[in-house]
Amino acid sequence: MEVFNLLVGFIVIGLVCLIAGIKLGRKFQHYDNLKTANGELKEQLAKRRHTYSTADGLEDALAVTVDLILRGNLERKYWRAQVDQLNEILGMVRAGPLAYDVDRSSKRPPSKDEA
């Protein structure tokens, strides 16, 4: 009976040691993964980056792009006003041979700054 108890005791101690070893192995593996990730991040930080001059140039290029977009919007509004006026005149002409008022005040489309 003593041999049986001793054998069960060794098996329990062995299982406890095995479980502790597995948990400890996972901790070491996690630590190694963190070291690898840390090394990769250090390599990325060591790479060359944009200089202040490059960043300033990119900001200026972005400002020009935004200006082009805004001016394009104004141009489209100006063209739209001219097309609307053209449609109005042609609509009056199409209404009949005497429908167009020759004394009509000529509306000018808005200037590009007003559009």
Image (cartoon, helix red, strand yellow):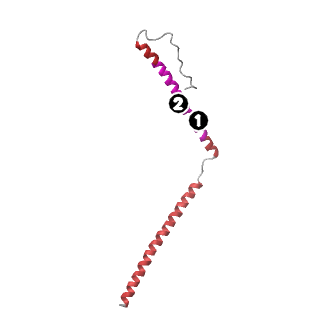
The residue at which mark 1 appears reads as 64
Residue 34, numbered circle: none
Relative to the observer, which residue lies in front, 108 or 31?
108
Vertical order, 28 against 65 (above or below)? below
Q: Is residue 62 magenta?
A: yes
Residue under the point 50% across and 21% down = 82
Residue at screen point 43% across, 13% down:
93
Give the residue displayed 48% in from the left and 19% down from the top: 85
Q: Where on the picture, by quarter, is residue 108?
A: top right
Which residue position is annotated with label 2?
A: 73
Q: CA distance from mark 1 to mark 2?
A: 14 Å
The quarter of the picture where the C terminus appears is: top right
Does 59 sit above or below residue 43?
A: above
Q: Residues within 10 Å of mark 1 (few under 14, many from 20)?
A: few
* Most common SS among magenta residues: helix
Between tags 1 and 2, which lies in front? 2
